[in-house]
Amino acid sequence: KDLNYSNFIQDIINQDLKDGKNDGKVHTRFPPEPNGYLHIGHAKSICLNFGIASRNNGLCNLRFDDTNPSKEDTEYVESIQEDVKWLGFTWDDRMFYASDYFEKLYEYAVKLIGLGKAYVCDLSADEIREYRGTLTEPGKNSPYRERSIGENLSLFESMKNGEFPDGSRVLRAKIDMASPNLNMRDPVIYRILRASHHRTGDKWCIYPMYDYAHPISDYIEGITHSICTLEFEDHRPLYDWCLETLSLDHPRPQQIEFARLNINYTVMSKRKLLELVKGNYVNGWDDPRMPTISGLRRRGFTPESIRDFCDRIGVAKTSSTLDTALLEHCIREDLNKTAKRVMAVLRPLKVIIDNYPEGAEEEFEAENNPEAPDEGTRMIPFSRELYIEQDDFMENPPKGYFRLVPGGEVRLKHAYFIKCTEVVKDESTGEVIELHCTYDPDSRGGNSPDGRKVKGTLHWVSAAHAVDAEVRLYDRLFKEPNPGEDESRDYKEDLNPQSLELLSSCKVEPSLANAGGGSRYQFLRMGYFCADSVDSKPGAPVFNRVVSLKDSWAK
Ligand code: ATP
Ligand code: MG
Ligand code: MG
């Protein structure tokens, strides 16, 4: 048991354990609806549910909350399993589907009718809303509320047997139309819907509502602590009503609400994410700009960094919006420890070293990661023609510019000092296309025996040995901190048109020729990058920028 772990949910569990509630068992569940891919908000719920279970010698189920067939699909069921596993959690044989319980849920509904606690209602959806009343006005009883138990039983069976059209009738819990809580004003618990279910096909034409199915599914699985987000706080009386009315009480699952995770400059509703995918605003659910787990994975985030993020943000009872910079801080910290340092030139400028013998070449030894000496070293080839970053040369530099300038001297990382002797420009555009330099053979390894100082150290690659690469620089998906905040505009109008910059003529050191499969690097001075797991091919790597080097997280 982790004694440093503390939050209000753990406090509740500690009290329950002390009281001997639920025979000392802790059993949670993560209940995604398979109607989209998981996002970073789900990661918080996953870390919380699986984390609470393992910290208390308990169990956590993965349950697909699949009671809404029109939006659900096996593609999502599969991606959710992949993402939970990738995050580092296992459920062994505890993977369930709410649809496993359709038969039982039906039986419990029949039981409710038998208890006089549910009735078939013929009002239309609009009428039900009208009759419900408002926060300041009590509702009105449905004219169908006093149907006899016998009539309700027979009508409900006919609903199940497909004798009525979609939407013509519903089953409602008989609670209290004057309740101050609108959720308790005879909520709908079953509806008629002819939609093929991804698991039960066309077997059912009635489907249970979430508020009814969830407490019973929790009970069936022996869940003790049913953790959900704050918007369900007002639904808790209904959750408890279902269990109490049906006498489902050992163990009696307890619903506990926590604040959902919000992050600025992105959206986190599956409906909106689906719309971005379907409308081709992004390249699929795993587009590296998406806040989805699969997008973050493809971008180059590690499971460790996401778990670390979820630990740091903690669990609270009040909502807040977090800064993306914290998530970036977490991946930067992780990659600083683990990513190999390599040289890659993203916007190449040719450098010719006139006094270096033509056709000659040599190699320099470079350490792979100063933070991890065990990672060893590798050899980097050097020759007469090199590439440096366009930004690392300026003809008319401002004060304080320590990189290469006409007549100036810089150090090439791991190699030599070079001095710029001539600038070659395109005659028509005036653009700098090539630099001529001389090198100081005595500065081999990066220091001059005469103690001469240079301020700038540049990364470079040997032109003859360089590998061509494509690099994708990602920026925030949205240009506003809270997309669509102002009701007057659609959140999509806040998309950042510059969220992706494609660099297609990058030059990287030869050790990266076959980089792939999501391997991660620090490109010296340029940031952390991840070889794209889909588009990288041997000899033609593609890199995604995970995050820049500069940390903007205010600690
Ligand atoms: P969305 O609004 O994005 O569709 P949802 O809550 O409908 O989200 P579910 O598939 O039902 O999505 O979510 C599964 C679990 O993940 C639920 O227990 C839910 O409370 C939790 N969850 C969803 N979004 C967040 C979030 N932003 N922060 C924390 N937990 C979340
Ligand atoms: Mg949900
Ligand atoms: Mg939803």
Image (cartoon, grey):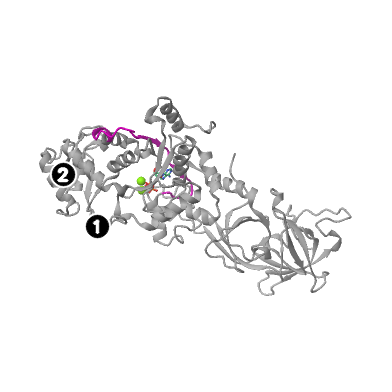
Q: Is residue 265 magenta?
A: yes
User: In 3D space, how far apart are the residues under numbered discs 1 and 2 (Cα atoms)?
Assistant: 24 Å
Q: Check disc 1: other Cα within 10 Å, few if <14, some if 14-19, many if 20+.
A: few
Near-viewer residue (88 or 250): 250
Residue plotted at (68% across, 68% down): 466
Q: Secondary structure at mark 1?
A: loop
Determine whether, in the image, residue 351 is placed left or right of residue 102: right
The residue mark sitting in front, 1 or 2, is 1
Q: Identify residue type, mark 1.
A: Asp
Other residues around mark 2 within 10 Å, as few (<14) / some (14–19) / many (≥20): many
Count of numbered circles in the view: 2
Q: Which numbered dot is residue 262?
A: none
Residue nearest the viewer, comparing 379 with 502:
379
Q: Quadrant of residue 253?
A: top left
Whether 81 is among the magenta residues is no
**Residue 519: x and y, percent?**
59, 58
The residue labelled by disc 2 is 121
From what the image shows, is residue 143 above or below residue 465? above
Question: Viewed as shown, does residue 296 lie left or right of 541?
Answer: left
The segment highlighted magenta reads: 243-268
Nearest the eye: 537 or 59: 59
Return the residue at label 1: 202
Per the image, label 2 sits on a secondary structure element best described as: strand
Q: Mark 2 is on which residue type?
A: Cys
The reply to whether residue 367 is in sight is yes
Identify the residue shown where x is 74% and y is 57%: 366
Residue 292 appears in the picture as rendered: no
Q: Nearer the viewer, residue 60 or 175?
A: 60
